[in-house]
Amino acid sequence: MTHKSHLFAALALLAAAGALAVVTLTGSGVRGSAQAGPISRAAPAILTARAASGDKPRVLLFTATPATLPPTGGAVKLRALVANATSCRFAAQQKLRSLPHSVGCASGKASFTLHFKANNGASRRTYNFTLLLSGAHGKLKAPAVAVHEAGHGPSGTSSLSTTATPQVTLNPASETIAAGATASFTAAASGTPAPSVEWLVSTDGGTTWNLVIGASSPTYSFTATAADSGEEFEAIFWNSFSAATTSAATLTIGTVPQVTTQPSGVTVAAGSAASFTAAASSSPAPSVQWQVSTDGGNTWGSIAGATSPTYSFTTSWQESGYQYRALFTNAVGAVATGAAALTLTPQTSSNWSGYVASGGTFSAVSGAWTVPSVSCSSSPTSSADWVGIDGETSNTVEQDGTESDCSGGNASYDAWYELFPANEVKLSTSSYHVYPGDSMTASVSVSGHVWTLVVSDSTEGWRSDTQVTLSSTVPAQSSAEWIAERPEIGSSLQSLANFGTVAFTAASATDATTSGPISAFTFAPVEMIGSSPGDLLAQPSELDATGADFTDTWYGSS
């Protein structure tokens, strides 16, 4: 590992001012000196050490903070960072009730807090603390560090400057990166004087901690390798008053997501469900966000709520040709799957041709058309043009419109309404004349249980309004339709009259949230097919630019 060493070089931990004890250890011996300076500040007593070879116990840092107490006494914290030791015994050269005291230090850390009463004497007191390490390969006694308690006399009074113990203001954050990327941990602390900092690393889940050589800035950065995954980092801040340690941050070396399952293109009938599935692997496991492109893959947008490996939805005709992909992301990076296209085909029916809107609770539908002129032969045929609510997925239909019938080579035309399963009601041809070329409008609406069905012929100048209360039968209101139909009499479908082309205009509907043209809803075209595969009887055109107009064209009778 190039960014840190498991051998510990000497730390130059110099207090801003005040008492400072520095001793350097080499091997199992002791080399160094103790220097007593002025005690005008509550400076920590600090011992720094050079790592010894082998597995013998080692002292990395031994402090007593604060190094100066006022005459009123206070608390002193003994703190040690060690290596290869299982027991740390704090002691004092003076007789103190709370010392000696032994603590376990296999983790590499040990601390003990003493409380001193007020010094009522005139002279200052000095306390010398020692540390004895015990480990599997021997023992080591660290040199003493001193704490001074000021007295009340002229010679014992300390002129204490304003100091503040370090307080951690920013803990390092755990991060996940790829091998070869730069790992960076940042910490901060306040204090007066401004605290110094050193970084520690643990390679065993926080059980033991080692100093990182040269890492003495608030931000520690290095190029990570796969072997660094799982290491923990923390910073220790100290000034001439005390010390504080951050919480630990974990480094995870992850991998960029790799796609293992690409989504496949889907072809379904408009209005039915479509599903796309994708998968990717990485460490840590990736999240997924499905995206859609409506312009052939040039731009992509995220789909709200589509965050599972499989994205399923009910299709609408306007989505045909859309492309879908999954974006897999983790803390290391992101990867997108290939694009999968959605191809929609018209719905098919044996008796309907036109458009169906669905996906809401519909309360109104309306539309307009011109009554087509049917071409008759000797065989009886029929066709009907209408607007309505229900019938696509429900067993009720609320509808009104016009009908064109051929019998004996002659054509007849009429208007009607129906609330299926009840029979249709034909409007009197003597009062409500209908002729080819007439401009018709029709609507169906509901309020509460009252249904209103309106048919009008602006060419002939008449209008029919009918209200029906449905208290026992509750329609589903699950779809709206604009249809050219092959009527059914009894249980038999009639041959479809050759109506040529009928043009529907101003087709609109209202559901609980939307009022607008067909294109404002989830919609699908419906083609009428015969009894044999490939027999196309009638087919709607695409919607025009308004989303409300289309034509329906006859192709066959049965």
Image: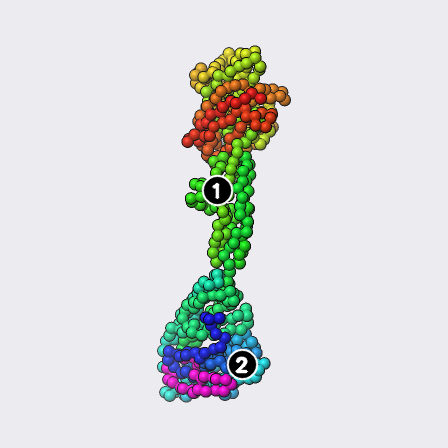
- Expressed as whole percent of the image width and height from the top left, the position of residue 438 reads 45, 17
Residue 62 visible in the shown view: no
Question: What residue is shown at x 53% (from left), y 46% (from top)?
Answer: 263
Query: Furthest-right residue in view?
Result: 491
Residue 262 visible in the shown view: yes
- 305 shown above or below 476: below
Magenta residues span 22-46
Q: Quadrant of residue 17?
A: bottom left
- Expressed as whole percent of the image width and height from the top left, the position of residue 293 reads 45, 43
Taking the magenta stretch, the answer to whether it contains residue 40 is: yes
Q: Any mark on residue 323, and which? A: 1
- Label 2 environment density (alpha carbons within 10 Å; few <14, some 14–19, many ≥20): few
Taking the magenta stretch, the answer to whether it contains residue 56 is: no
Q: Any mark on residue 54, and which? A: 2
Sequence-first disc among 2 and 1: 2
Question: What residue is shown at x 45% (from left), y 74% (from top)?
Answer: 213
